[in-house]
Image: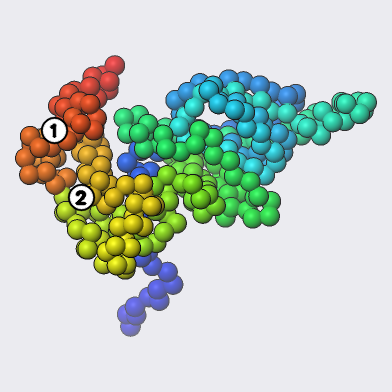
Amino acid sequence: MTQTPEVLAETPMFETDAFSQVLDIVHVRGESARVITPDTPLAYAVPSGRPCVYIVEQGQLDITPADGPAVRLGAKQIALLMQGTAHDAVFSDPDQDAGARAGRLRSDPPQIRCFCGSFSVDGDLAERVLKSLPEVIVLDGLADNPIEWLDELCYLVLRELGATQPGASLMVSRLLDLLLVVILRRWAQSDDSLPGWLAAAKDERIARAIAAIHSSPAHSLTNAELAEIAGMSVSNFADRFKQVMGQGPGAYLRAWRLDQAAEALRHSSAPIEAIADRVGYASKEAFSRAFQAKFGQSPSSWRMARDTAAQD
């Protein structure tokens, strides 16, 4: 007799949130990882270009951006450099240094252990989207309030790095993606001065409106329609949206449309007229004027520059 299997868990259908959509549009991808456990204090320069994360397990890490103040991390602290800022990294063991100052012998190796990961991003859009973040994001208090899955993800990354199984490099990349999400999610929950796209993650009502804008950029949703989606009055919604996002709903929609258009020009061969229609512009001319005003280039010049860069 055929029976219907018992469903213990089922993947829900849900709309992508603003947090995920922004990370997707800048094409954040995990690239590489390693654990630093030097036998002596270590210092090296990190060039600009790739976002990176440091998770200090033991010892001390001093990060000095090229044009900013130094940041010191101790055990159970995390630093995230999403802008890919050039910086100096100095690893040391303050307990060993304190012992040396007290006259004790430095016979034991320093207790230094730090997980390091790097990411790639789409250079065209990432700079604009990520520039609102601090150069160095620091998370602490992890000893008392650990980030869920953090240790497990680091362990899995390191295990895959040492594996020779097929797909190991892809596993490392995807695990680093997850690691970045859980770290940014914690920061979004703990910081009160977030850029708009992360601040939306803390306000469920505004996040619903953002998701509606993102899901259908060609549809000119009115403030009344967005307020209904958010479950707020029109006046309260407009004020709250601007407070959270730093601009009104209409301005945000126009910016999102053009970001989506830039993404399409970068990664597809669709005609410019089709892209303009897809993001809600009635004519190619109106789209070109708006695109030029935002990016300083016409859509065709933008696409040509990207094609030229890909060939170099």
Q: Amino acid at mark 2?
A: Pro
- Determine whether, in the image, residue 23 is placed left or right of residue 144: left
The residue closer to the viewer here, 256 or 272, is 256
Up/down of 64 relative to 261, above or below = above
Q: Which residue is at a point 31% across and 61% down the rendered structure image?
A: 237
Measure the C-alpha gap from mark 2 to mark 1.
18 Å
Q: Amino acid at mark 1?
A: Arg
To which residue does mark 2 refer?
Answer: 217
Q: Check the image and name the residue furthest to the bottom.
A: 1
Question: In the structure shown, which secondary structural element does the residue marked by tag 2 occupy?
Answer: loop
Neighbor class of circle 2 (other Cα within 10 Å; few <14, some 14-19, many 20+) is: many
To which residue does mark 1 refer?
Answer: 289
Up/down of 239 relative to 61, above or below = below
The residue closer to the viewer here, 41 or 227, is 227
Corner quadrant of residue 219:
bottom left
Disc with the residue nearer the chain's start (2 vs 1): 2
Q: Which residue is at a point 27% across and 20% down the rendered structure image?
A: 309
Q: Check the image and name the residue furthest to the right.
A: 103
In the picture, the quarter occupied by the C terminus is top left
Neighbor class of circle 1 (other Cα within 10 Å; few <14, some 14-19, many 20+) is: some
Up/down of 130 relative to 247, above or below = above
Q: Check the image and name the residue furthest to the top.
A: 312
Give the percent coordinates (x, y) of residue 23: 38, 43
The residue closer to the viewer here, 295 or 165, is 295
Corner quadrant of residue 29:
top left
Give the percent coordinates (x, y) of residue 12: 36, 65
Q: Which residue is at a point 66% across and 25% down the rendered structure image?
A: 90
- Answer whether residue 74 is visible to the viewer in this image: yes
In the picture, the quarter occupied by the N terminus is bottom left
